[in-house]
Image (spheres, rainbow, N blue to C red):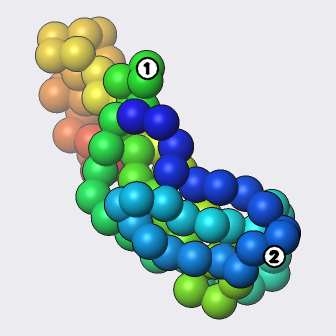
Amino acid sequence: METIVEYTVRKKPLNAYPKRVISPFHHQSCCSARMVQIGTVGKDQRGFSFYYRRCQVCGFTLRHFLPIQPPEESPMVQRLRRFPRAVEQVA
Ligand SMILES: [Zn+2]
């Protein structure tokens, strides 16, 4: 999936998800508290899952990538099964 976000300062921020989103170039002080998910989870060209997050104040938008799931029975999964508290910490 190609990005739908256009970063520019020449146009007003716009949320026309899922077709396109116009975002300012830079993160500002408003963004950390006002970012919300827009749309659903998608995958990029590499197969990584992400969704878009957009600031409700200035329109700054980015991709928020989800943690990669370890394959079943990998050493990490086996370790987490033995120590259930560790599962809570990584969830
Ligand atoms: Zn902002």
1 to the left or right of 7: left
Q: Is residue 32 left or right of residue 4?
A: right
Amino acid found under the numbered disc labelled 1: Arg
Is residue 34 positioned above or below 1 on the image? Answer: below
**In the rendering, at what x and y percent does residue 58 appear?**
70, 83
Q: Are marks 1 and 2 in contact (CB under 8 Å)?
A: no
Where 74 falls versus 85 (above or below)? Answer: above
Q: Residue at x 65, y 89 (%)?
A: 57
- Asked if 30 appears above or below 68 in the picture, the reply is below
Point out the image quarter for the N terminus: top left
Residue in the foreground of this view, choosing between 78 and 47 = 47
Is label 2's Cβ within 8 Å of ligand 1? Answer: yes
Q: Label 1 to label 2, Cα distance in Å?
A: 29 Å
Q: Is residue 32 above or below residue 84?
A: below
Residue assigned mark 1: 46
The residue shown at (31%, 44%) is 42
Q: Which mark is residue 82?
A: none
At a point 57% along the width and 77% down the height, the residue shown is 14
| Residue 68: quadrant of the picture | top left
Q: Which residue is mark 2?
A: 28
